[in-house]
Image (tube, rainbow, N blue to C red):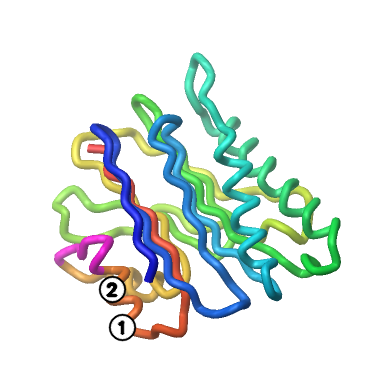
Amino acid sequence: MAWSAQHARAPQSAAFTHPDGARSCCQTLTDEVAGVYGLAHGHGQGPAAEVAAIAALRACSRARPGPAGFDGASVRALVELAAAEVYQLRCSQRAYAGMSTSLALLVAGAGKVELALVGDCVAYILDRAGDRWMPVLCGAPAWLGPVAQVEPALSTIRRRPGLELLLASGQTLPILAASPSPAPTPQAIAEHSVRADERRGFGLVCVDLS
């Protein structure tokens, strides 16, 4: 299991990934300066899975907020940029034929959080009592790669004290679907996911916006 964490005054984030072989690869993005966080779970033969996930997040990493910050339209545009980049790569080389990736994107602004999800990924929010991780948005039934444009599932959440969000994919999803209480830490979720089935990969990004 690969582990990385980044801490800043606000927000704080941590990212976890675990591989499941040559046909899929999870990559994460934690950009504290821009307030952009992402999780991509790529699929494909050989290096294509990693290439797809990295390309999607690379497109999102170029984001910089304008004077009014990010809104739903600008976050949708980021997903469209990522979709076009993965599609172009898929069409450009035979080795990348068939590759695809999910994408979960979280953009934190001064008073709100924008979410955009595509594919087999879910965003969770820690309930106000801190007892459970509750699903707040599921990925749209599509993948980046097969087509040049996708329509993500979108949601806007108002920032408040104690707000904590997770972006999750792969083996973490059945763990979180069981709604364990009290809410496990992100590291505990990652460790439990490996113990449950070390052959299945996953990605997990936690963002503490309190």
Residue 136 visible in the shown view = yes
Residue in front for this viewpoint, 76 or 57 = 57
Amino acid carrying label 1: it is Arg
Residue wearing tag 1: 195
Residue wearing tag 2: 191
* 185 falls in the magenta region: yes
73 w.r.t. 208: above or below: above
User: Real-space Cα distance between discs 1 and 2?
Assistant: 6 Å
Q: Which mark is residue 85?
A: none
Side (left or right) of 56 relative to 108: right
- Residue 76: name its quadrant: top right
Please name the residue shown 37% across and 61% down the image.
16
16 w.r.t. 38: above or below: below
Residue 142 visible in the shown view = no
Where disc 1 sits, the SS reads: helix
Amino acid carrying label 2: it is Glu
Please name the residue shown 35% across and 61% down the image.
3
Task: Please state the horizontal and vertical placement of residue 210, each as a whole percent of the image.
Answer: 22, 37
As drawn, the residue found furthest toward the top would be: 67
20 w.r.t. 39: above or below: below
Task: Please state the horizontal and vertical placement of residue 204, each as a whole percent of the image.
Answer: 39, 60
Task: Please state the horizontal and vertical placement of residue 32, each as a whole percent of the image.
Answer: 38, 36
Looking at the rendering, in which quadrant would you find the N terminus? Answer: bottom left
* 46 falls in the magenta region: no
Task: Please state the horizontal and vertical placement of residue 183, each as a whole percent of the image.
Answer: 19, 63
Q: Residues within 10 Å of mark 2 (few under 14, many from 20)?
A: some
Task: Confirm or deny contact between disc 1 and disc 2 (CB under 8 A).
Answer: yes
184 w.r.t. 126: above or below: below
Where disc 2 sits, the SS reads: helix
Please name the residue shown 69% across and 41% down the image.
81
The span shown in magenta is: 182-188
Residue in front for this viewpoint, 70 or 29 = 29
